[in-house]
Image (cartoon, rainbow, N blue to C red):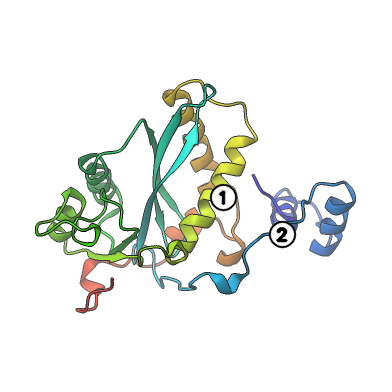
Amino acid sequence: LDAGPETIAYHLEQAGKRAPSTSTIRRVLTNEGLITPQPQKKPKSSYIRFEAAMPNECWQADITHLFLADNTRVEVLDFLDDHSRYLLSITAAAAFTGPAVAAELTRLIGAYGPPASTLTDNGLVFTARLAGRKGGRNAFEKVLVAHKIQQKNGRPGHPQTQGKIERFHQTLKKWITARPPAQTIDELQQLLNEFRQYYNCTRPHRALGRRTPQQAYTTGVKATPNDNPKEEWR
């Protein structure tokens, strides 16, 4: 995975070895050509910075795309806990319908408890009202209402609102492209399962004080829909 100087130092310490300073590690990586300059990288100010205070306070969800060996495009649905960056689930399919996305949300609620809120874009699988449909709710929204979960949607044309999951997708795609391409969706799912295990349980996150997402998610009290403010957030 995209292990930088801080991550390398962390793993050396976990292995009981004395780690050099991160500046020394960075210098070695640069000298060996293992760090690629990214002048095109967006400045931090281009993202809306917010941080959920508790696990389950907000789940971000999104659909991205990956490709099989024959260049077949596959959809990947992921749910990410905003506070801990814990990857609740990541699933590959030829295409996701609204009911399929709602079913995955329902499964996660059964496994982890209902979050206080969700944050998504305005795709039709996530919302009907903000996507131009008059009246009614889609399957995803019906699950939210049933569990009294607050629905949050980013402004149309502003993916920066979902900055954490957008950055997560960069990490995911870097990891996937460093491996032989999957031949089938089932093979891709096996890779995604392997990625989820490493991302949650092995890879420390600088924003989490060098804890792993699993450590951050399982520490402390989790939020519930009872913690929601009364006003809507859209």
Q: Disc 1 designates what residue?
A: 170
Query: In this rendering, would 147 be left or right of 39?
Result: left
> Where residue 149 appears, x then y in whole percent?
21, 63
Quarter holding the C terminus is bottom left
Report the amino acid beneath label 2.
Glu
Q: Nearer the viewer, residue 220 or 174?
A: 174
Foreground of the two, 117 or 139: 139
- List x then y, in percent, for residue 150: 23, 67
Q: Residue furthest left?
A: 135
Looking at numbered disc 1 in the image, what kind of residue is underneath it?
A: Gln
Vertical order, 29 against 206 (above or below): above
Q: Is residue 47 left or right of residue 138?
A: right
Q: Is residue 96 above or below residue 216?
A: above
Residue 109: x, y in percent? Answer: 25, 51
Q: Nearer the viewer, mark 2 or mark 1?
A: 1
Front residue of this view, candidates 58 and 234? 234
Mark 2 and mark 1 residues within 8 Å of each other at the beta carbon:
no
Residue at 20% over, 41% down: 99
Element at badge 1?
A: helix
Helix, strand or loop under label 2: helix
Q: Earlier in the sequence, mark 2 or mark 1?
A: 2
What's the distance in space between the residues labelled 2 and 1, CA to CA?
18 Å
* Residue at which label 2 appears: 6
